[in-house]
């Protein structure tokens, strides 16, 4: 493949690639042992959007921000005009809407899977309100994650709970506009440590199927057991037209929320490759929402987010360079070494010079991280927010 052709392919890939930032990724977070407070962390929705706006301004590929209803819309639907105005002010759009049916005390034993019908109703009402918020802010996806599960064998009726999930999700689906989607996220454990109601992609897939045609599966890369082959899950969901979106992050042990590509960039590359391979083979553009779900306690949040976005662009660009005609031929003939080399060649290609040209052509910063550091924004928010952050409680005790 000539250098010009490579450049053309990568530019086309970059033009098509957008990734959503999580509002919660700019706020103070920690572990279950306590929060680590950062002087520059955002403590309001306005500050979160301001930070997200900076990341988008520097990288040019994050026009939308995922919101968590309880954290960003404190008065629910009534907060809509204010939050919408903030998004406009900071040059971003509101992306996926995440209901929160895990934080309130009533959800101790579950939300849609709770044995108490009143609690199931409360969870459903909150999800319906989130869908309504989505309609009012022009957001397409309601992204559902449930902490539901149990900690001790014998304490939860798994089949009843599954049925209650089906009922609740079907009701929620009935309230969608034709263009809206419900994304169902799975997670094997945490906070529940014996059983989780939607523990893996198979359960999410079955539930999405029974929910309705606008329900799809959301793959959070941190929500798998060690060594699970995520790109195979991706390939299967693509074949079933059931892959709705990703929550990207990296991990070493469990749901570690580490910077994308910091531990295993080849894994992310292989995921992007499976998507590109599917699109090439079928001629169908996969309708996937790429989102980041990371919240950094130790790194500066804005810098970590820029690192993530740039890494995602690089890995997406590399995956676009796999010579798929060759790969298909090698696979068919079982020419294993050549097939594997096809992937490796693209993975080891240095796409950074092409990315630099692409950024220049778009009038973007050549080095988003350096530009962020030079902009004075980090110093400014540290000055403005330090006092307020001193008052943030760091322990859960
Ligand atoms: C749960 O671990 C999760 O991945 C869900 O997507 C939540 O919305 C997000 O993290 C933030 O708590
Ligand atoms: Mn997630």
Image (cartoon, grey):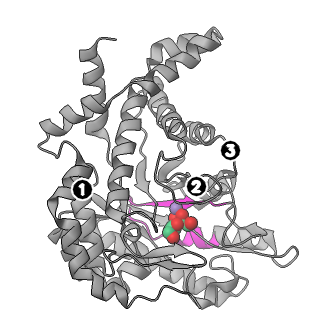
**Pointer 1: what residue?**
56
Earlier sequence position, callout 1 versus callout 3: 1
Q: Crowding near pointer 3: few (<14 within 10 Å), some, many (20+)?
A: few
Q: Please, is residue 85 above or below residue 11 in the view?
A: below
What span is colored magenta in the figure? 167-187
Query: How many discs appear?
Result: 3
Q: Are marks 1 and 3 in contact (CB under 8 Å)?
A: no
Q: Earlier in the sequence, mark 2 or mark 1?
A: 1
Q: Is mark 3 within 8 Å of ligand 2?
A: no
State whether residue 222 is above or below residue 36: above
Residue 222's disc number: 2
Q: Residues within 10 Å of mark 1 (few under 14, many from 20)?
A: many
Q: Is residue 35 magenta?
A: no
> Measuring 41% from the left and 51% from the top, which residue is drawn there?
289
Q: Is mark 2 within 8 Å of ligand 1?
A: yes
Q: Is residue 181 left or right of residue 225?
A: left
Q: Secondary structure at mark 2?
A: loop
Classify mark 1: helix, strand or loop: helix
Residue 67, visible in the rendered structure? yes
Q: Is residue 182 magenta?
A: yes
- Give the left or right position of residue 312, taking residue 385 as reference: right
Which residue was labeled with disc 3? 228
**Outermost residue toward the right in this view:** 154
Whether residue 257 is situated above or below residue 74 in the rendered picture: above
Which part of the image, by quadrant, shows the C terminus? bottom right
User: Which corner quadrant of the image does residue 231 belong to?
Assistant: top right
Q: Which residue is painted at 18% across and 73% down in the image?
A: 380
Instruction: Quadrant for residue 41, please give it.
Output: bottom left
Whether 286 is drawn above or below 296: the answer is: above
């Amino acid at each position: 493949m000539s250098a010009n052709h490579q450049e053309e392919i990568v530019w086309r890939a970059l033009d098509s690639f957008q990734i959503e930032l999580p509002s919660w990724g700019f706020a103070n977070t920690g572990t279950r042992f306590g929060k680590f407070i950062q002087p520059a962390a955002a403590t309001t929705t306005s500050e979160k959007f301001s930070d997200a706006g900076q990341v988008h301004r520097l990288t040019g590929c994050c026009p939308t921000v995922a919101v968590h209803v309880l954290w960003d819309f404190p008065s629910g639907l009534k907060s809509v005009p204010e939050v919408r105005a903030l998004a406009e002010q900071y040059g971003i759009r509101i992306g996926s809407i995440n209901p929160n049916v895990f934080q309130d005390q009533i959800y101790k034993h579950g939300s849609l899977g709770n044995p108490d019908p009143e609690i199931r109703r409360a969870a459903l009402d909150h999800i319906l309100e989130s869908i309504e918020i989505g309609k009012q802010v022009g957001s397409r996806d309601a992204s559902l994650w449930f902490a539901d599960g149990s900690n001790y064998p014998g304490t939860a009726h798994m089949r009843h709970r599954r049925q209650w999930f089906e009922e609740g999700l079907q009701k929620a689906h009935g309230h969608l506009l034709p263009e809206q989607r419900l994304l169902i996220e799975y997670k094997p454990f945490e906070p529940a440590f014996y059983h989780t109601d939607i523990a893996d992609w198979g359960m999410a897939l079955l539930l999405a199927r029974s929910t309705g045609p606008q329900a799809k599966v959301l793959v959070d890369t941190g929500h798998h057991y060690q060594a699970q082959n995520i790109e195979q899950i991706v390939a299967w969901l693509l074949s079933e037209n059931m892959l709705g979106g990703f929550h990207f992050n990296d991990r070493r042990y469990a749901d570690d929320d580490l910077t994308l590509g910091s531990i295993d960039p080849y894994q992310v590359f292989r995921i992007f490759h499976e998507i590109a391979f599917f699109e090439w083979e079928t001629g169908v553009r996969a309708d996937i929402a790429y989102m980041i779900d990371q919240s950094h306690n130790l790194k500066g949040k804005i810098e970590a987010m820029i690192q993530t976005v740039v890494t995602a662009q690089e890995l997406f660009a590399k995956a676009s360079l796999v010579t798929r005609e060759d790969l298909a031929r090698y696979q068919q003939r079982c020419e294993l070494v050549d097939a594997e080399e096809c992937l490796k060649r693209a993975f080891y290609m240095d796409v950074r010079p092409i990315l630099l040209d692409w950024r220049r052509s778009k009038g973007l910063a050549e080095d988003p991280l350096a530009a962020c550091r030079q902009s004075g924004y980090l110093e400014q928010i540290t000055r403005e927010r330090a006092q307020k952050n001193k008052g943030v409680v760091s322990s859960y005790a």
